[in-house]
Image (cartoon, grey):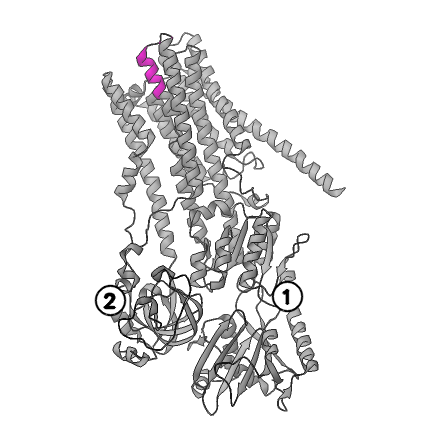
Amino acid sequence: MDPQGVLDAHRVTALGLSHEEAKSRLGRHGPNRIATAPPVSSWAILVAQLASPVVWLLAAATALSLTLGDVAEAVAIIVVLGMNTLIGFVAEQRAVRSMEALRRLDVATTRVRRAGSIGTVPAHEVVPGDIVLLEAGDRVPADMRLLEASRLAADESMLTGESVAAGKSVAAVAAGTPVPDRTPMLFKGTALTTGSAVAVVTATGPATEIGRIATLALDAGTDRSRLEERLTVLARQLIWLTLAVAVVIAIVGIVSGEPVVRMVEAAIALAIAAIPEGLPVVATLTLARGMLRMARENALVRSLGAVETLGATTVILTDKTGTITENHMAVERLVGLGGDADEDPLRGRALGIGVLCSNADLDKAGEGTGDPLEVALLEAAVASGMDIGAARQERPRLVEHAFDPDLRMMATVHGGADTVVAVKGAPEAVLAVCTKAATAAGPVPLGDAERAVLREAMDDLAASGLRLIALADASGEVDAARPFHDLTFVAVAALRDPPREDIPAAIAACHRAGIHVVMVTGDHEVTARAIARSVGLADRGPEPAVHARVTPEDKLKLVVGFQAAGETVAMTGDGVNDAPALRQADIGVAMGIRGTDVARESADIVLLDDAFSTIVTAVREGRVIFANIRRFCVYLLSCNLGEILLIGLALLVGLPLPLTPLQILFLNLVTDVFPAFALAATRGDARVLDEPPRPPEEPILARRQWTDVVILGVVIGLAPLAAFLMTLEQGAALENAATVAFLAIGLAQIWHVLSMRDVKGGWLVNPITTNPFLWGAVALSLAFFALALALPGLRGVLGLVVPTTGEWVLAVGASLVPLAAGQILLAVRRMRGGRSTARAVERATR
């Protein structure tokens, strides 16, 4: 069909559907969505909890208890297993549902013409018959037939497998033409690489070409980050290492004449003590919570792996327009060859070019849709008394030559009384293709002297931080296919796009955090440097803070160059040509408002407000999340090491078993889970951006963290062991000594969370002590211990007795030893850090 035939077949005009008809068709055809994999069910999450080594180990312990006739212990193990599974289920379900909620935030939109007005609607609300307006970088929301096309090409590789962009045109093709050769069609899911288009939707949702291909259905499962994988591997290695140790100890004990049952029970206790069952679950929950926090701060993180990398960012390559600046432009001056054209007759001619050579529009309320620069020209035209609709009707568009990033110009050809070419673009590019200049007295040839006058005027405007766009035209006998030659230079529009108010503070925060911020823009260098100076951007040694007149290829080279120098690079972008640089960067950051669909899908993070300060917020959150993961790793591993040492050393010196498997299960249920979750929710403090970025290759647990695990784990194990031994030497029964050991190590692990503060944190006021979740976890853990001693049934199952006053004093005193050791370790580190800083300052001032 020809374009008009398609419009007639869908009962729609070039003005688009009415809002009522669009709503009616949405009800008939359904949402414009293809079938996707269903969300992860609660049942699947529950089953996944049972497929873990700790469950298998507990099942073996249950079977052993039943074999030995200890039914009470078997039932107790099953109860603890159920509680452990329930906690893991709730935590993982929250993480999965959080990820699904984040995906729902990432809703694509598209521009449609309805009832003669252009507006933006969610892509899933597009219906057959809608008139859709697309530009380079847009993702095609549905199958559609072209009505208008200019220099149009689309990437259809996901549908056809062809890597070369497919050229498109309005001309009809024969019925039955294969999909790759349907040049007047655009298909859902493909992306425009160049040009612009107006098209009518012919199919949506399951009726589209991609909707018919079931194998292309998206998987809605939860992605696993590299960090989560490393934590899982770490937990698995610890499990097998400790199982091996437990088996060796059991064999040595049996060979030495110890009862087989006692040594098997000891081996199970050691294995249970070693398994950090909460590690992967808490990590997933931490990442999910952090991503939700970032989303509330307008940073939509599209992959879990980006969260880990954020904290290591050392360089941010950022756009200027809309990121550093407000992206709300206003025409401040119009300057031609004769000077200011604000009161000149050429003003109307210049603004007329801005009205014709534009794909933007203003609604009845004056709200603009489209490129902010084009919207600003329309607003200036309306302010001058021009009727945009009448001007466009008087000069109907015949041909459009979409903006070409290489030429840095756009042109439209219009009919009417005569044929007119309207051109706008980068001042140097437009000036280079002009042969005449308009003046109040008429056109004059553009010689070297005239060009020098215009360049000097443009340099002066750019130096004051103004954005420049040149306007030119031609009329009479013009070549519609070759519009960029023999033009008349009319004026340069100088637009003001002021910096965002929060930018200076955000850039200062980056500098304190050791992050080098580099402005990368296609704008004039003088303009870019004026903006950079106003917001506090500064060169770093030989590395400039501004790269101007940058092409998309240059952006990719900059990213690769910084990475080759060992930097971790975050790169912002909004256009389709930015996609390679966004993919290459360690963190690709796309603009959510003005960014193209291709840019957003190539990025790791989408800024919902296009603000640079949001990147800084995301970096801060990334550092906090990584620090929290380190905190609970150190906490869990040191607690588990303490339990292993308590049991292992007691066995090696011939003492009775201080803790039974059931007691260890209770300890892990109470002290491993609740405090670890609370540590994961720590919000961090302002000083998190006062530290340099961590090296990207640094592991989760570096040497310092492993040192903490060993030192604190040894103290957590030895203090309760000493209390256990002292109780036995006083002539107390084994049950009393075991109760003292149980209380000492349990309380020690609860107080241990207070040693997880930062070295530079205050003694009493720090992110740990100001975390309400932590105090709730402490109170809950203490309540569980109180119940274990107060309830006769639970006390009997756990093998505990009510301790005497002296035993309470011994248990509590032993539990405070690891806390004191942790605070001493922090104090020593703080003093060493202060001396290192002083020496660094002294060296710097010499």
Residue 127 locus on image (x, y percent): 29, 69
To which residue does mark 1 refer? 525
Which kind of residue does numbered mark 1 sit on?
Glu
Residue at screen point 40% across, 36% down: 232
Question: Is residue 651 left or right of 448 when viewed as pictured?
Answer: left
Q: Could you say which disc has been placed on residue 612 in the image?
A: none
Which kind of residue does numbered mark 2 sit on?
His
Which residue is more in the foreground, 489 or 213?
213
Q: Which quarter of the figure has residue 460?
A: bottom right
* Quadrant location of the C terminus in the rendered image: top right
Magenta span: helix, strand or loop, mainly? helix
Q: Is residue 18 magenta?
A: no
Label 2 residue SS: helix
As drawn, 806 above or below 288: above
Marks 1 and 2 sit apart, C-alpha to C-alpha, by 51 Å
Label 1 residue SS: helix
Please indicate, yes or no, whether residue 575 appears anywhere in the rendered image. no
Q: Residues within 10 Å of mark 2 (few under 14, many from 20)?
A: some
Which residue is more in the foreground, 111 or 635?
111
To which residue does mark 2 refer? 29
Look at the image and give the residue range highlighted in magenta.
256-268
Of mark 1 and mark 2, the one earlier in the sequence is: 2
Which residue is more in the foreground, 259 or 420?
420
* Quadrant location of the N terminus in the rendered image: bottom left
As drawn, 386 above or below 234: below
Residue at screen point 36% across, 25% down: 272
Residue 793 locus on image (x, y percent): 27, 22
Residue 241 locus on image (x, y percent): 41, 25
